[in-house]
Amino acid sequence: MTTRRLTATRHRGRSYTKADAPRKDLGRAVLARHHVGGYEPRTVLRFDRASHTLVFSLIAIATTLAYIQSFQGSWISDDVELIAGNTMIRSLAPANLRAIATFFEAGINYVPLTYLSFAFDYQLWGPHPSGFHLSNLVLHVANALVVYFLLLHMQESSGIAFAASLLWALHPVQVESVAWISERKNLLSTLFFLLAFHVYTRFSARPRARTYALLTVLYVAALVSKVNTIVLPALMLTYELVIQRRLRPQD
């Protein structure tokens, strides 16, 4: 048997052998071979910076085309009371900000950051729902891009990350949250939730005080956008147990 010497190289912050380095330049994409545990190497598709820009553009264009009709929508259902007829969001005066900070939607939902976003929208667009619809769309596109980066970090495959983030953006389950202005809380809380989890997955192996500070700020922002995001610690624990396997008892 012939023994082959492999020279260690650095790629994307990890140590690989020369045999693992990118094999072939495909213009805007690179195929790389990775050893996973004791299994055979797997081939993953990686995009360069220009291709990432193209991915962003494709996601934004596809999502805009899917939801462009929502711009013609007016105030519906809860929009009338919670936004169009809500004097609390019509200015950023101190009295209005205090009202937002102490307001409970339907008497139980504490979502001040969501209503603060409505107040900012009102300063930009006035009482015109099309501007509010635009803000919802921007948030939804931002969420899809965070999904892309999150999966890119976890899977290291640009192709999988792109396909999954595009599916996220265009899946029919998202329609109500994007097209119904009052459901802004879903979009806003999802943005901070995903950002917090992304920060955790990137820096959990190298914990620093400023990382935990940023994670805490994002988590609190998610909570005051919609309380359902309280499950983030459970997701982080699942990530450690199932994906990283750092918390398993030693044999």
Image: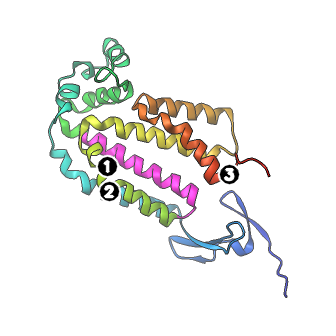
Which stretch appears magenta?
133-157
Q: For numbered disc 2, what is the local secondary structure?
A: helix
Instruction: Kindly report the distance in space between the C-alpha atoms of the residues bearing marks 2 and 1.
Output: 7 Å
Residue 21 quadrant: bottom right
Q: Secondary structure of the magenta portion, mostly?
A: helix
Residue 122 quadrant: top left
Q: For numbered disc 3, what is the local secondary structure?
A: loop
Q: Is residue 48 above or below residue 145?
A: below
Three-letter code for the amino acid on which mark 1 is drawn = Gln
Residue positioned 20% across, 47% down in the render = 70
- Of marks 2 and 3, which one's residue comes earlier in the chain? 2
Mark 1 burial class by Cα count in 10 Å: few <14, some 14-19, many 20+: some
Residue 35 quadrant: bottom right
Q: Position of residue 97 (x, y in %)?
A: 35, 17
Instruction: Kindly report the distance in space between the C-alpha atoms of the residues bearing marks 2 and 3.
Output: 32 Å
Three-letter code for the amino acid on which mark 2 is drawn = Leu
Q: Is residue 236 above or below residue 105?
A: below
Is residue 56 a member of the stretch shown in magenta? no
Cβ–Cβ under 8 Å for marks 2 and 1: yes
